[in-house]
Image: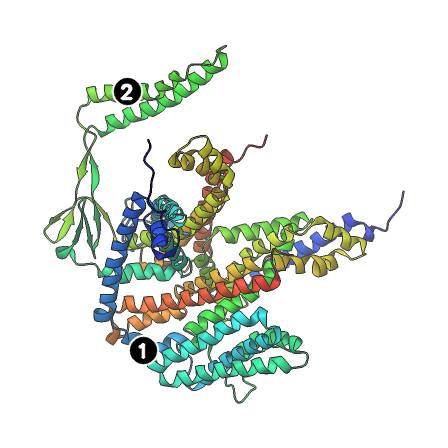
Amino acid sequence: MAAIDLRPPRLTVGPLAWVRKNLFSTWYNTALTLGVSWLLYSSLKSAALWSQTEARWGVIEANLTLFMIGQYPREELWRIWLVIYLLAALVGLAWGTWRNAARGFAVMALGAGAAFALICFALNWEAWINWLIADAILLIFFLIGNFLPYASRVTVVGWLLYFPAIFLLVAGSRHIAALPPVEMSAWSGLLLTLLLTIVGNLGSLPLGILLALGRQSKLPIVRYFSIGYIELIRGVPLVTVLYMADILLPLFLPVDVRPDRVIRAMVGFILFEAAYQAENVRGGLQSIHRGQYEAAHALGLSGALTTALIVLPQALRAVVPALFNSFISLFKDTSLVAIIGLFDLLRIARSVIAQPEWLGTHREVYLFAFLIYWGFNLAFTYGNRRVEQALGVGKR
Amino acid sequence: MIYKAFWRDIRFLQMLAQGIFVILLALAAGYLYVNVTANLQRQGLTVGYGFMKNPASFDIGESYIPYQASDPYQRALIVGVVNTLVVSLVGILLTTIVGVLVGIARLSTNWLVNKLAAAYVGVLRNTPLIIQLMFWYFGVILQLPSVKQAIELPGPAFLTNRGIYLPWTETTATFPAWRMYLILAIISVFVIWFVLQIARSRASIPLSPSWNLSYLVIPVLILWLGAEIQPAPPITPYLPELAGLNFKGGLRLTPEFAALLFGLVLYTGAFIAEIVRAGILAVSRGQVEAARSLGLTNGQTLRLIVFPQALRVIIPPLTSQYLNLAKNSSLAIAIGYPDLFSIAGTVFNQTGAAIEIIVVMMLSYLSLSLFTSLIMNIYNSRTRLVER
């Protein structure tokens, strides 16, 4: 007679069952778990030991402002804060206007402001109050957004005006007494990194759309020109394009025109990114159903109007995720301007290490720069997901 | 028949549009040409490749082909191309291994392994490669102990701030003979394949599968005969050992090469891991279930059913990652590895030949990219689904 198994069935819920199922299900999973745990433990232990004993974190504290804005004149610092205040106001307005669609993003911005305030409270006395003000502005404009007439339109116009406003504030103007011009060579640090990202993306989009349309064109010369440009740029490294912009651009311009290095780098990014944006947009153009063209034709729209009013709006919405990915990768790629001698976050990090009193602090400084890039990319990725949801990409 | 005015004829309009486009392009090109000549005249420069024959008179840290400072510029640039190729090829090989392993780890049922792989991918993909390279170079490899206190790993391999020393092999006197036997054995495999193919097409009944054993037997026979003629082994181990102030023997990776390779492999590996994961997930669940119900083991299912199908999804994005790795090797300049970009930069600084150098540089990278995509496209068309 077969023995009857009288033991109770194995536990399937609770933490113990979870551990058994996810960590020790088979003998090799057990071995893997133990091996990986040991590796993790020993590396975390030595990292923690290093960070508590050997690491000189003072280098970050002492140079925080340098990392953020580099050589930007300190007496004009208020302009950078104004840029941040404006951002806070616009995020708050968007939250008040669109509620759910913008809430996640706004809450994140609020949290980031609070976190920065907390960090600055320990490191930099002057900065923390500014972050608190930014958070307060965000909340005030959230309330305003709730009651404002035509809130949606105001918010959109505000965002559109925001990007030119950044440049006006950062660069200043000879005609405005309160905003004396700031030399472009003084734009540096994280500020330069972010400016390059914004210019590279916004500037390359129109060119990218034109190239994508050119690649789809029925005119062979236009098509082959677009294909040639896109494939040429995609076949070479970004550094060579930046290098080309830095060295050849002055040669190709009239003798008396000598744009600043920052402008040259921006041109390089725009030329480079346009080829990638074109491929993104082409994906969107190809996703448009034939019926859309036919319907537009039947309504009597001309080719140009069909493209502008029917095809492009749908195509661009379809490629929002891809455009955001380009945005993120361009943000990472801006660090290459350090090679052609611009003082972005990375180059500033290198110059900080070169200071006599902070020699040998490579790990601390690079880890800090690493964390900044990583943090921004996490935020961008999150924003991407929210925008996708708001636009209903892939649902409509 | 309807006669249209010619300015309403679509063919005419298309030609007109292209004509305008060409004229605009020509105008732009002409404008740039005028500017370039004016600028060059002002700087007293001429365009031409004559300088390529002049002696380079700078040293290069590492080179896989003979080079000295008195060699001409063209030789220096070729050294750069070879250095780029070496680091790209080794990098592509290693990053594929890393990527596949991490990609599979991302699908592991083991929570810890899964999350660790996810963290690796998430962190490395979201930070700039150049910072990673600088961290590995300045923060890790240059901070390794000096030669005297080298970290010894089994092998023996030694980690020092002067470079990484790995066990390697040395060829002996019998190496040329053995190389010939090996080539003969490889040729024999092709001959057997060819002969069997002909025999199959002529035979009236299917050939016995045991004929396939000849693929194994004949090459082994050739190699055994070789061993009878030349009993001495073709290679001997060549181990690094401490000799005076430095290590002798073994394979030395310079700190620059090691950091560049390490950074490129880990960075690209994170992207490849996501591609491999997506490829494996793209194989429909029914395929795995069908394989299981046919009695295949887990390993067999992965090897015979899932992987061949996943490969079709994986190859195209993998190609672009290989291209990215080759292009990203140009960041070597940040840590001082003498690749094409860095040497071209030095040549430009010495000669001021901006246009010529940039053309050479772009053409080299472009042909490298086109060549890689050509090979991968051939491989892709072989693994592609054959629609019936």
Amino acid bearing label 2: Ile
- Name the outermost residue toward the top: B204
In the rendered structure, the answer to whether residue A297 lies left or right of residue B275 reads: right
Q: Quadrant of the C terminus of chain A?
A: bottom right
Q: Residue at x 41, y 69 (%)?
A: A342
Mark 1–mark 2 Cα distance, whole angstroms, equals 70 Å
Q: Quadrant of the N terminus of chain A?
A: top left
Q: In the rendering, at what x and y percent does residue A232 appear?
A: 52, 51
Count neighbours of disc 2 (C-alpha within 10 A) and say few if under 14, some if 14 to 19, many if 20 or more: some
- Name the outermost residue toward the right: B1
Q: Residue at x 46, y 61 (%)?
A: A242
Amino acid bearing label 1: Glu
| Badge 1 and badge 2 in a common chain | no
List the residue tagged with mark 2: B222
Residue A235's place in the image compared with A384, above or below, is: above
Element on which disc 2 rests: helix
Residue B387's place in the image compared with A118, above or below, is: above
Q: Chain of mark 1?
A: A
- Name the outermost residue toward the left: B244
**Observer-nearest of B373 and A258:** B373
Q: Residue at x 23, y 58 (%)?
A: A42
Q: Identify the disc placed on residue A61.
A: 1
Q: In the rendering, at what x and y percent does residue B385 appear?
A: 54, 35
Q: Residue at x 39, y 76 (%)?
A: A70
Element on which disc 1 rests: helix
Q: In this rendering, which labeled residue sits more in front, label 1 or label 2? A: 1
